[in-house]
Image (spheres, grey):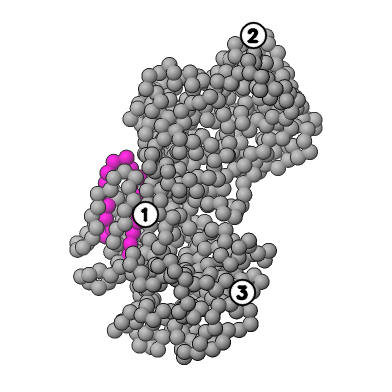
Amino acid sequence: MSFGWKAMWVLLAASSTLAVAQPAAAVEPLPGRMDAVFGRAVVFPVRTTGREIPHRFEVRLDDGHVLSAEVQWIRMSTRTRAACGVAEWFPAATELEAMPASAPGAGTGPGTWVASIEYPLTSSGQGFWIGQNRYEPNWLPDPRRLASSAGGLGRAWNSPLRAGQRESPLLAALLEPYAEQPLYRWRYDLCLHGLVPGEEFDAREPGGPVDDLEALRAEVARQGAFTPLTAQLEALERARWQVALARLWLADPSLSFPVREMLAGAVETPGGVLPLWRASQAQLEDLLDALLRPRLSDEERVRHVRSWLQSFDPAVAWVIDDAGLVDALTGEFRPTIGVVNLDVAPALAFARPSQVGGPSDLSPLKSREFRTLRGEVMPGSLEGGIQAGPGVEVRVGRWTAYLSSIGMIIPVAPPGLALGPLRREWTLESWMAMDERKDAGPSADRTSAAMLTRARLPARAPRGAVGPAVQDSGETWHLYFEARTPERGWAGAGEDRVEFWFGPFGDPTSAVRVYADGRVIDLRSGRSVAEHQVEIIRLSDRWVARFPVPVGMIESDGVLRLAVVREDPCGQRTSWPRRMLPGQTEPGRVAVQTRTWDGLGRD
């Protein structure tokens, strides 16, 4: 256990403040290991007593030097919902705000008190005293000095991504929320640039000589001004990981790349490069503790890291599409399964029961490789007598998963077939857990509903409608779509849109985008089209679209394959029947039987 972020994360989870009565001193560090870097300020969370919070307190070094430590309140906050236009692949970033101890809001809400001691360079390595109590920091070497003293160590801090991967626009968009966050900046940099130590560890000693006039003016201007400690906290966290990765490289270079992949890896998909930051905060702290704990041998560190790597699942699999492909031999629908091999070694992957023969993909997967497989639906049982609904058994090496599949053609009967719920894009946590329901629901003011039905459409558009009038053409199959919108409205509300996809997955017979302002775009050609007689109704808190199913979309046997995707003006996508990955352009389909509307059934 260490001082710093672990204590701060615990505080955030508890959503409480620190005010523990300790008669021995007005301020004392929280229990645990206190990591510090040679030549840098010693920064650590503290707890205080009494009603008056000191903005400074006195500390005495082992060599007798008396220094003044500064105290600030670090407020923590996490948005319950991402801001408009911000990607939601990762959990919402924890934001830090530093404020003086005398500020009105200091000490209230989630957060912690943090102290900083500006050690003279010649005093680094010493302990310090607060009152009658002595505290011993766990002194870590300056990472830049460490890099210059160990040949070839620079590879310990390289990004685990290839140069082409780091240039992916999708990767940049998904990482952007973490670019300026102190808790995550080290991981962001490791992913995109590497974590090679830079000039941040060549800072001048406070009060030292200045040979640059502009620097002197800046230092004078800063005197007496409030300087947030969040920058020092960020630098400390960065240094801890730089030292940890260097120690791992020196102990066993073969473990360096797999660990960096866990911390800041990625996978290439057809839609772009997805960041795979698999380790949770608790797992990060566990790894960091093993690599920074004093008096731990290299052999013990290596054993711990190997065990840490083995604690992660070696693969992930999910259903992309339920009915877009038809087996050429049997005529049955075959689901499309997505798999990624997350192990360091290649593995064979397939999507059918091991005891069943017949056609199937048998694919060798490289490490961190994405692949689609044609699944074979099981009727509803698993090996060992475990019962489940229709699904697909997926194997990647020795790893096995059972994925639920629709496994049937859905009959349509009056008054219609409800299409939904529309679910948000996969998040990293839900995708790794292979949980379709986790983090799936949009907020109440972004929900959508849809229905496939057959009815006579009105001959003229009602009041409030936009777009061309719908002509009376008798009963026709159409899609009814309703989208809620915030009561306060959106900037660019006309950009709210829904997409209707028809036909086989990977080879759609039609794909149309309908905007809330009545525009209709053919997604295959990119051109605006007018032949679709779309009816749009806009209300204060929602908009409605009636879209006739295009001629020829219903196949000769009465089957209609379709999907629905909505993208609101904030860029949040929801889809049915399956969730989509960020960057994925085409949704999976489901098959419905339209002949059952008249009680005929499928031939």
Q: Amino acid at mark 3?
A: Arg
* Between 232 and 598, the one nearer to me in the picture: 232
Q: Amino acid at mark 2?
A: Asp
Q: Is residue 322 left or right of residue 88?
A: left
Residue 333 position in % (x across, y down): 30, 70
Residue 538: which numbered mark, if any?
3
Label 3: how many residues lie within 10 Å, few (<14), some (14-19) or many (20+)? some
Q: Amino acid at mark 1?
A: Pro
Q: Residue at x 49, y 84 (%)?
A: 415
Q: For residue 12, what is the image quadrant?
A: top right
* Between 420 and 478, the one nearer to me in the picture: 478
User: Is 346 covered by the magenta stretch?
Assistant: yes
Q: For residue 516, what is the image quadrant?
A: bottom right
Secondary-structure class at tag 1: loop
Label 2: how many residues lie within 10 Å, few (<14), some (14-19) or many (20+)? few
Vertical position of residue 15 compared to residue 85: above or below: above
Q: Is residue 573 visible?
A: yes
**Considering only order in the chain, which callout, 2 or 1, is on the residue closer to the N terminus?**
2
Q: Nearer the viewer, mark 2 or mark 3?
A: 3
Residue position for label 2 = 63
Quadrant location, the C terminus: bottom left
Secondary-structure class at tag 3: strand
Label 1: how many residues lie within 10 Å, few (<14), some (14-19) or many (20+)? few
Residue 460 position in % (x across, y down): 56, 87
Mark 1–mark 2 Cα distance, whole angstroms, equals: 61 Å
What segment carries the magenta color?
Answer: 335-353
